[in-house]
């Protein structure tokens, strides 16, 4: 399985390697989807972690022990159904094909494969899509 | 075999009219054959729901006491026209608030009014002997004001191009967000459901045609701006923007679900409304033209990273465009629509039920639009 986490760091642990811990100690497959560090050494990364559920839980608990703040990401792309007029402008700008149209041309968002890049957000003309990280 | 408008309207009044949408009719004619279907079917309904910047609304606020001749008018901070009579205005859909970052404009004022929300009216005037007041600061709703007519100088573009971007940077256009190196392409037509692709030479659509306009009744009131006929046709329909329609309708009848103010990133404000046009099946030729399919309707791919001289790179039909990707010189380009097909289907479906229920009759146009028209361009003064 694959799960996504927001891992927040600060000047005390910004030089550590979360990915190394997950690979070396737990044989998990981490993938950094997004990361930033501000001038004061603080910031966060969006981490996708693949492996079995139990190992992912153990691995992320260990990351927390190392002083990082770990928040599982659920529904990190939010679609406001009442606003969406189903034009489809968001569909082809999604790099992971997480936004699709069904046979009736309704817009479907797959929250599991969304990598939180935000490409769809500024493609939406009614601000129906929002990145919640 | 042919029918008249009056014969069709008689069937509508007695709730016996046979009506199909422009998508449903394709299979009906395949099954029954054109002759039999032309005898049985009375009306085909079409629909479209896309962005059209050439939109707006005329309002009359009513007079205050003492009265004011408004010359500078803001609605929710959006400047609207102060060049009409004392308390009349025109809201242009693309008008913006002073702070363009708000992403709010004339189209959103129209949307808010139709949704029944109060709108802040702030207006100033010179103060004259007959209109002594110099300013007014109040709120209005659609119910409070005298008239509110949606007016589209241009809508229902017959067909439109496909946009892509060959440059190395993302560009933000009225055709949406176009990723670098042709990673995507956008298009904007309801295809086989689109009104003017089902009556491509405007045999039945003209001035006075009774239409579905954003959930209320409306009318075709003139040819649309940028109306042209000199566009190449394939399978009997143009492969690019050709004919257009000017539309008018009472905002007080409209349904907010068919009206959306749009904030198109990097471009500006536009208005999307649902428009449905009924096509009377007066004879089998008219019906035959309503059987056009997405596979038969083509559009041209052009490069929006070019500032001018965008030439056709390739052409694709709407079935290819709707499949999610097209191929250009061996490269796969992902496609997406900018107009709502699900919305267009709702429009055509709702209009169909109005007609079936005897609530909406057809009107024979009082004027046909030009059979030949071409566009002029704007040139700079020769100094």
Image: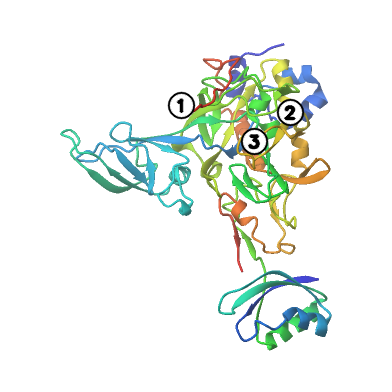
Q: CA distance from mark 2 to mark 1?
A: 52 Å
Indicate the quadrant where residue A45 lies. bottom right
Q: Chain of mark 1?
A: B
Residue under label 2: B25
Which residue corresponds to the image point at 62% horizontal and 13% vertical from the top-left?
B4
Looking at this view, name the residue that lies furthest to the top. B1
Q: Position of residue B319 (x, y in %)?
A: 77, 36
Determine whether B172 is above or below B249 in the image.
Answer: below
Q: Is residue B283 left or right of residue A41?
A: right
Determine whether B199 is above or below B301 in the image.
Answer: above
Q: Secondary structure at mark 3?
A: helix
- The nearer-to-camera label among 1 and 3 is 1
Residue under label 1: B381
Label 2 packing within 10 angstroms: few (<14), some (14-19), many (20+): many
Which residue corresponds to the image point at 56% horizontal and 76% vertical from the top-left?
A39
Q: For residue B349, which numbered disc appears in the image?
A: 3
Determine whether A53 is above or below A83 in the image.
Answer: below
Query: Which quarter of the figure is the N terminus of chain B placed in?
Result: top right
Query: Which quarter of the figure is the C terminus of chain B placed in?
Result: top left
Label 3 packing within 10 angstroms: few (<14), some (14-19), many (20+): some
Q: CA distance from mark 1 to mark 3?
A: 50 Å
Q: Secondary structure at mark 1?
A: loop
Q: Earlier in the sequence, mark 2 or mark 3?
A: 2
Q: Tell whether label 3 touches label 2 (CB within 8 Å).
A: no
Q: Earlier in the sequence, mark 1 or mark 3?
A: 3
Q: Tell whether label 1 touches label 2 (CB within 8 Å).
A: no
Q: Are discs 2 and 1 both within one chain?
A: yes
Looking at this view, name the residue that lies furthest to the front. B383
Q: Chain of mark 3?
A: B
Q: CA distance from mark 2 to mark 3?
A: 12 Å
Q: Position of residue B178 (x, y in %)?
A: 66, 47
């Amino acid at each position: 399985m694959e799960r996504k986490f927001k891992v927040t760091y600060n000047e005390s642990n910004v030089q550590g390697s979360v990915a190394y811990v997950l690979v070396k100690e737990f044989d998990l497959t981490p993938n950094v989807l997004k990361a930033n560090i501000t001038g004061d050494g603080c910031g966060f990364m969006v981490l996708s972690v693949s492996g079995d559920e139990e190992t992912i839980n153990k691995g992320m608990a260990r990351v927390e022990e190392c002083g990082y703040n770990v928040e599982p990401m659920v529904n990190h792309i939010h679609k406001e159904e009442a606003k969406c007029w189903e034009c489809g402008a968001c569909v082809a700008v999604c790099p992971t094909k997480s936004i699709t149209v069904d046979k009736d041309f309704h817009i479907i968002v797959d929250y599991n494969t969304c990598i939180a890049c935000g490409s769809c957000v500024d493609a939406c003309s009614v601000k129906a899509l929002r990145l919640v990280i | 075999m042919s029918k008249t408008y009056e014969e069709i309207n008689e069937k509508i009044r007695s709730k016996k009219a046979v009506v199909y949408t422009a998508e449903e009719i394709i299979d009906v004619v395949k099954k029954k054959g054109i002759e039999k279907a032309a005898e049985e079917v009375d009306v085909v309904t079409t629909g479209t729901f896309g962005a059209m910047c050439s939109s707006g609304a005329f309002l009359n606020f009513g007079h205050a006491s003492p009265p004011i001749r408004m010359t500078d008018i803001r609605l929710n901070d959006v400047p609207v026209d102060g060049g009409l009579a004392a308390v009349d205005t025109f809201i242009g859909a693309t008008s913006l608030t002073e702070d363009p970052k708000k992403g709010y404009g004339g189209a959103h004022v129209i949307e808010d009014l139709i949704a029944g929300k109060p709108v802040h009216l702030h207006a100033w005037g010179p103060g004259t002997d007959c209109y002594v007041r110099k300013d007014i600061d109040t709120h209005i709703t659609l119910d409070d004001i005298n008239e509110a007519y949606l007016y589209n100088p241009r809508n229902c573009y017959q067909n439109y191009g496909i946009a892509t971007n060959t440059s190395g940077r993302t560009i933000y256009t009225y055709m949406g967000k176009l990723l670098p190196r042709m990673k995507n392409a956008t298009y904007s037509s309801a295809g086989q459901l689109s009104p003017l692709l089902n009556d491509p030479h405007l045999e039945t659509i003209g001035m006075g045609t009774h239409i579905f306009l954003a959930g209320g009744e409306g009318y075709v009131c003139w040819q649309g701006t940028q109306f042209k006929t000199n566009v190449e046709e394939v399978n009997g329909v143009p492969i690019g923007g050709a004919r257009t329609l000017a539309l008018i309708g009472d905002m007080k009848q409209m349904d907010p679900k068919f009206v959306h103010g749009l904030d198109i990133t990097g471009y500006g404000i536009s208005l999307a409304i649902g428009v449905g046009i009924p096509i009377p099946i007066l004879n089998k030729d008219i019906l035959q033209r309503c059987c056009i399919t997405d596979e038969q309707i083509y559009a041209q791919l052009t490069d929006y990273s070019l500032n001018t001289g965008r030439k056709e790179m390739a052409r694709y039909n709407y079935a290819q465009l709707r499949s999610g990707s097209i191929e250009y010189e061996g490269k796969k380009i992902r496609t997406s629509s900018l107009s709502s097909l699900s919305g267009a289907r709702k429009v055509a479906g709702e209009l169909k039920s109005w007609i079936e229920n005897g609530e909406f009759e057809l009107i024979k146009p009082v004027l046909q639009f030009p059979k030949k028209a071409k566009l002029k361009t704007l040139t700079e003064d020769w100094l």
